[in-house]
Image (cartoon, helix red, strand yellow):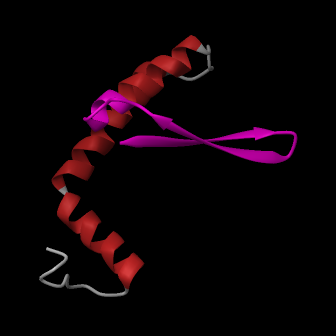
């Protein structure tokens, strides 16, 4: 998996693609929060972590619905072909 980030410098936008050897979304979240802590960003990290866990829970519980809606947005179809299954 890769993580995509954007940096704004002097009105230019730089796209950064990070290859991180993580396989679980929670690991990504924990890594990002750790990086924010290292950068001393003025954010309540405990609240951010708590909200992130709740978002991951909802995404996991409703992953089929989320996938279906994203599939429809991309393809314009609601049903997958046998080849796509």
- Residue at 33 percent across and 80 percent down: it is 72
Q: Is residue 84 above or below residue 60?
A: below
Q: Which residues are magenta?
A: 1-28
Q: Is residue 20 above or below residue 10?
A: above
Task: Pick the quarter of the image with the C terminus.
Answer: bottom left
Residues 38 and 42: in front is: 38
Query: Percent from the top left, x then y, of residue 64?
Result: 18, 64
Q: Is any atom of residue 47 visible in this view?
A: no
Query: Percent from the top left, x then y, of residue 61?
Result: 16, 52
Task: Pick the quarter of the image with the N terminus.
Answer: top left
Where, by quadrant of the figure, is residue 33 drawn? top left
Q: Is residue 43 above or below residue 78?
A: above
Query: Percent from the top left, x then y, of residue 62?
Result: 20, 58
Residues 77 and 49: in front is: 77
Q: Is any atom of residue 7 visible in this view?
A: yes
- Residue at 24 percent across and 49 percent down: it is 58
Query: Percent from the top left, x then y, of residue 6?
Result: 64, 43
Q: Is residue 24 shown left or right of residue 52?
A: left
- Residue at 75 percent across and 40 percent down: it is 8
**Is 29 covered by the magenta stretch?**
no
């Amino acid at each position: 998996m890769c993580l995509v980030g954007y940096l704004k410098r002097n009105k230019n936008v730089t796209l950064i693609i990070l290859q991180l050897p993580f396989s679980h979304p929670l690991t990504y979240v924990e890594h990002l929060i750790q990086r924010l802590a290292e950068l001393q960003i003025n954010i309540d990290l405990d609240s951010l972590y708590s909200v992130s866990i709740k978002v991951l829970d909802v995404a996991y519980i409703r992953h089929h619905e989320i996938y279906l809606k994203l599939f429809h947005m991309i393809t314009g179809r609601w049903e997958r072909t046998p080849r796509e299954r």
